[in-house]
Amino acid sequence: MDGHRKAGFGVPDGSRSETTTRTGRFCDLIVRFVAMILTLAAAVVIGVDKQTKTVPLQLAASLPPLHVPVTARWHYLSSFVYFVVANAIACSYAAFSLVLSLLNKGKCRGFIRSAIIVMDILTVALLFSGFGAAAAVGAIGWRGNSHLNWNKMCNVFGRFCGQGAASLLLSLLGAMAFLSLSLLSAFRLQRGFK
Amino acid sequence: MDGHRKAGFGVPDGSRSETTTRTGRFCDLIVRFVAMILTLAAAVVIGVDKQTKTVPLQLAASLPPLHVPVTARWHYLSSFVYFVVANAIACSYAAFSLVLSLLNKGKCRGFIRSAIIVMDILTVALLFSGFGAAAAVGAIGWRGNSHLNWNKMCNVFGRFCGQGAASLLLSLLGAMAFLSLSLLSAFRLQRGFK
């Protein structure tokens, strides 16, 4: 690597730099594919998240409790809707950029490369905001908030919360994959590999 | 700009490229300073956010309501704590990177530049996750959630919510400033300007 640096800022030459460029591109494609799968899985896992439980409802002290079925659905919380939309956008973009990266040849190469770097960083921002929103609401659902009298729900809808947590983990890994792609691009540009 | 591109990937030369490099660095310093001020303001505005209101409390139907003082504080919600910590870290890093950028000379220049780009992208992720978390909880405080029986609080603590919204806006602008810094670095590297 020192050899490349000594050659100047921009233009590493020789077979070693060519191999490094190819390895970098291969890593980029693999991480992009993994990011696509993770964000797709995150969106699907929470998109099918639904649980129905029969809970006792006390209408009056003198009457026996009424058992009513209550259903928890992901789209009851706007943060989860935003989370699903963010992951769906990230997944679609990952698929699109994967195709673009594979076909990235000819005159427009520099422009496409720039566009992909910009979009990668924007996707990092989108996914982390979605993760923050869903995790914040998930934390309230899990522990509740006594100050605001917001009751926890995970003691009743355990499977719903477990599935939500799995989706959060998948999305976090997807967001970290996009983060790696941005850092990888920055390093490759810093060292002059396109 | 085309002239610079044609000169090669890495080493734009001549007085015009020198001027462009200086302008880029000047923009970087200005945006970094603005990001520091915005994240500092966001952390301070929500850090001093507190409101006390006297609310009627009905203990029994036969008794008159009891008026009790209730205080809303930012640290009652873990999402707001995370939001403040994220903004404080971003502000400290902005100040540190500002000094580093000003003193960025000599042999370690390339390494410092790389470290700043990596940290800028990580700060984008941190700030957007903090914004997402605080905005999600803020939205429940503002509108409530009838499905989960989480009552809204902004109808009672209007000033508290207003101040929280102002802090969210400041943090979003700060996060966008860091996003601009990351994109600016990517563009400068893409065009070969360090």
Image: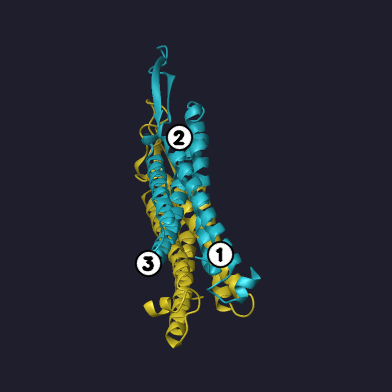
Chain colours: A cyan, B yellow
Looking at marks 3 and 2 on the same chain, the residue that comes earlier in the sequence is marked by 2
Q: Is residue B182 left or right of residue A82?
A: right
The residue under label 1 is which amino acid type?
Glu
- Tag 1: Cα neighbours inside 10 Å, few (<14), some, or many (≥20)? few
Q: Are marks 3 and 2 on the same chain?
A: yes
Query: Measured along the vertical axis of the image, is residue B138 above or below residue A59?
Result: below
Does residue A80 show up?
yes
Residue identified by numbered label 2: A45
| Residue ID at (35%, 33%) | B146
Q: On what subunit does the disc labeled 1 rest?
A: A
Find residue A181 and report its horizontal and vertical position in percent: 51, 56
- Mark 3 residue type: Lys
Q: Secondary structure at mark 2?
A: helix
Q: Residue furthest front?
A: A15
Q: Nearer the viewer, residue A166 or A107?
A: A107
| Circle 3 residue | A107
Q: Is residue A100 left or right of residue B117?
A: left
Location of residue A113 by image quarter: bottom left
Task: Tell me which label, 1 or 2, sits earlier in the chain.
Answer: 1
Q: Is the Cβ of the residue at disc 3 closer than 8 Å to that at disc 2?
A: no
Answer few, some or many: residues within 10 Å of disc 3's Cα (few below 14, many 20 plus, some between 14 and 19).
few
| Residue B77 visible (yes or no) | no
Determine the secondary structure under disc 1: helix
> Do tags 1 and 2 sit on the same chain?
yes
- Work out whether residue B75 or residue A180 is closer to the camera in this orientation and state it: A180
Chain to which the residue tagged by mark 2 belongs: A
Per the rendering, the mark at residue A18 is: 1
Residues tagged 1 and 3 counted as in contact (Cβ below 8 A): no
In the depicted view, which residue is nearer to us: A36 or A160? A36
Identify the secondary structure beneath mark 3: loop
Q: Name the image quarter holding the N terminus of chain A.
A: bottom right
